[in-house]
Image: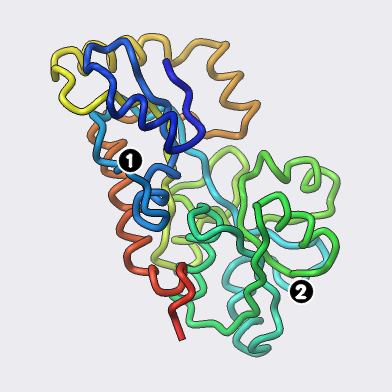
Amino acid sequence: IVDPTGATAWGKVQKASPDGYTLACLSSTVVTADLIGGSPVKYEDFDYVTGMGMDPQYIYCKSDAPYNNLQELVDYCKTNPGKVGWATAAPTSASTICSVAIINQAEIDVNRVVYETGSDSLVGVLGGFVDVAVGEYGDMAAQVDAGELKLLCLLSEERNALDIPTSGEQGFDFIFERPRGIAAPKGTDPALVKRMAEAFAQAYDSAEFMAYLESVAIDPVLQSGEEFLASYRTIAGTVTDNMAALTGQQQ
C-alpha cells in the first residue's frame, strides 16, 4: 500500500496498474486539491474500496469564552459584528471549508484570520489572538483535557464518544463527513475491488486497529466503496457552493 501525503504519491497510484497491488490511503485533501488547488489528480480517478474511519471536525474556543455551543457563538457574532476573530488556514484544508460554510450559512460577520496551518490556528486561539477555530480533536486533545479549550460543536451527523452536540442538533444544516480509506487505480476489476473490501472488513474490528483509530481520534466507521465516494462527492458540493469565499473572491 502506498500511503500518500499529496498529489505526487496519489499520482503514482492513479497511474499504477489496476491489479490490486498498489493502493492509496485517501483523505479529503484529494477532493480539495482537485477542486481548489488544480491538482492533476482528480478525486474520481480511483475505484473506491472502503472507508476505514471518520476524521471529524470540531468548532472550538478557549474555555472562558462567553459561548458554550454553536448557537450561542452565532448569536454572539450577530450582536457583535466583526469582533470575533475566526482562524482559518489554507483554502484546501477541512477546517477552512467548514469555517467558511458555517459562516456563510449563519450569515455572520466575523474577522477571518488566515494562518498557514491548523496547528498555527490552535496556537492563535490559545494565545488569544483569535477567538474561534475548527480542527481535529487529536490536535487539541491535551488542551481540552487540561481545561484550556472547549468544544462547541461536532460537524458530523451523529454524536461520537466525546458526546459533543452536533451541528444538526443545534439547528444548522451542515455536516462534514470526512472519511479516510482505501482506493485502487481506476479500472480495477469490480470483483477484485469487492474481494479487497471483504478482506479489509474482516480485519477491521481487530483490537490493534481499533486502538490505532482511538490513538489518532478517528471514529470507527466502516463504509462501502460507494459510501466512501459519496462522502467525497458531498465534500465536493460543499467546496463548490463556497468556492468564492474559499478563494477570496467573495465580496
Secondary element under disc 2, as helix, strand or loop, is loop
Residue type indicated by callout 2: Pro
**Circle 2 sits on which residue?**
66
Q: Position of residue 21 (x, y in %)?
A: 31, 10
Q: CA distance from mark 2 to mark 1?
A: 43 Å
Residue in view at x 29 percent, y 43 percent: 42
Left or right of residue 40: residue 54: right
Q: Position of residue 110 (x, y in %)?
A: 62, 80
Q: 117 and 212: which one is in front? A: 117
Which image quarter holds the N terminus?
top left
Q: Position of residue 19 (x, y in %)?
A: 22, 12
Picture layout, residue 192 above or below residue 115? above
Tell me the mark number nearer the camera, choosing from 2 and 1: 1
Q: 9 and 21: which one is in front? A: 9
**Circle 1 sits on which residue?**
41
Picture layout, residue 150 above or below residue 205? below
Q: 75 and 62: which one is in front? A: 62
Secondary element under disc 1, as helix, strand or loop, is loop
Q: Position of residue 220 (x, y in %)?
A: 48, 29
